[in-house]
Image (cartoon, grey):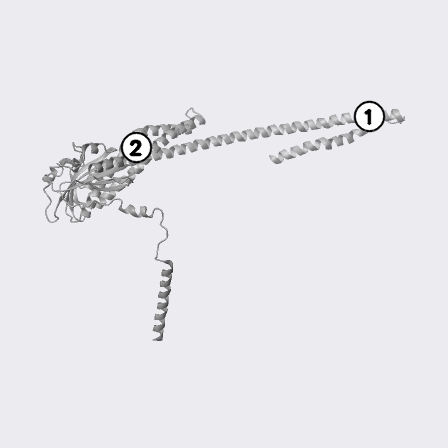
Amino acid sequence: MPIIIGVRRQWRNHAVVFWKSLCQYGPMTLPEDYSLRCELNDEVHTHQYEKLVPPERVSFIVLLVGEEERANEWRHLGALCGIFGQTLSDQESKNLHLDMGAFRLKVERHQEFTRYTFVKQGQFGNPFSEPVTHHVPEGWLAAIPGKTLVAAHIGVMRGDPLDAPPPLAEIAAYFETDTLAGSRAGSSSSLVFTDFRIGKDGFSRFLVIANSMLPTQNGRLLLRLLDVETYRMLALMALPEARRLISKIPAMDAELTGITGAISHGGGKNDEALLEDISQFADRLEGMISSTYYRFAATRAYFGVVANRLAELRESPLEGIPTFGGFLNRRLEPARNTCESAERWLDLLSSRISQASQLLRTRIDVRREAQNQDLLAAMNRRFHLQLRLQQTVGRLTIAVFTYYSVDLIGYVVDALVGRFHWSLDTVLIKAVSIPFVALVAYFLVGRKVRHALVNSESLN
């Protein structure tokens, strides 16, 4: 019992200390936020699903937008808001949801494109006879900044998972039957159909028979369909450039083969001319890579998004028509292979020209090294000749020095004999002095020559 009382007192003391500290420091707060915390957190909410309660009609437009057109987007949206009595904020945003009364508008601004989704709820007969865009001023729609990449009308009808699907002939009446594709999608087994054709009005068509009672689930399904349509078109933007490159690559490959052959076998060109050819080829190739790198990189990413969205559809086939995934995979695979092939060829040519350049530069360096060695050897030979000549001159100098020095000694002896009348033999004195004078000359002159010879041999 005393132990229990002691524990209670200890916990009471801790609680009193905590309360006092809380009163002292005020309410609990977090440290200062990271500058981009809210922006990073809200990134997961940027692409919200449009809540769809069938029947709904949807018109969807994707436009490629440049820098100049991007600057006019917000002003153009403001004009639409003014028509319907709405006010648009002066601060631009990437995503915008507007209720115009007659329809709802969702705007998504991406890096190189902008998506406009017009939605209207209400009963309809033919899902494509009166699209939502009829409620938008015609002049405003035609003046949207950008170039149209995707335009589609979507009819969202109420379905029942317990009922049999509508007859295929009834569905096909809205589409081109030769390219009709459809499936059951998602856990709700909603039915989706399209023919991937652009109609005379410039819009393609999608029909959704929604079996889900959840507006958000219907919105997710619609968003995935629109993502597939958007990103498949964006992915195919590199296809014309890839085809153009593939038509040029054989000629460039032959040119590079000729250059590498000339490096190996001469080809009548010297190394400097071959290096100039390689430099010009590399410059053209680098220009091609630089102009297509972004497009090919974006294409890889967009094909990945298409594959991901098709997987998220979780399609089940309908008898008689291909699924979205089956249709698109079969039609898109050749285009994807073409883009990847063009990119691989460019990378291979870049690698080959780099290797050829390195090979030629190595050969030039080896040749220059050999020339430098020959030059050093020639300089060494000239140095030795100069030393030998210096040695010869040194010996002649010893002889000349000895000759004139002995003559001077003779003059001195003759002068002494004439002055003091000494009986000295001048010839004998000169003969005796020759070895001594020669020895002195040898040490004064020949020593320098010997040192120069020894130093030159040590350098060699």
Quarter holding the N terminus is bottom left
Left/right placement of residue 180 relative to residue 92 reads left
Which is more toward the observer, 42 or 113? 42
Query: What kind of residue is marked 2?
Result: Glu
Label 2, label 1: how far apart the Cα atoms are = 108 Å
Q: Which residue is mark 2?
A: 68
Q: Amino acid at mark 1?
A: Gly
x, y percentage for residue 399? Answer: 74, 27
Nearest the eye: 310 or 142: 142
User: Relative to residue 283, is residue 53 depicted above or below?
Assistant: below
Front disc: 2 or 1? 2
Q: Is residue 406 visible?
A: yes
Disc marking residue 410: 1
Is residue 123 found left or right of 430 in the rendered image? left
Say which element carries label 1.
helix
| Circle 2 Cα neighbour tier, 10 Å, few/some/many (<14 / 14–19 / ≥20) | few
- Residue at position x 47%, y 30% from top? 364
The first of marks 2 and 1 along the sequence is: 2
- Res 405 → quadrant: top right
Residue plotted at (74% across, 25% down)? 400
Q: Position of residue 86 (x, y in %)?
A: 22, 40
Specify few, some or many for label 1: CA neighbours under 10 Å numbering under 14, 14-19, or 20 or more.
Answer: many
Left or right: where 108 falls relative to 354: left
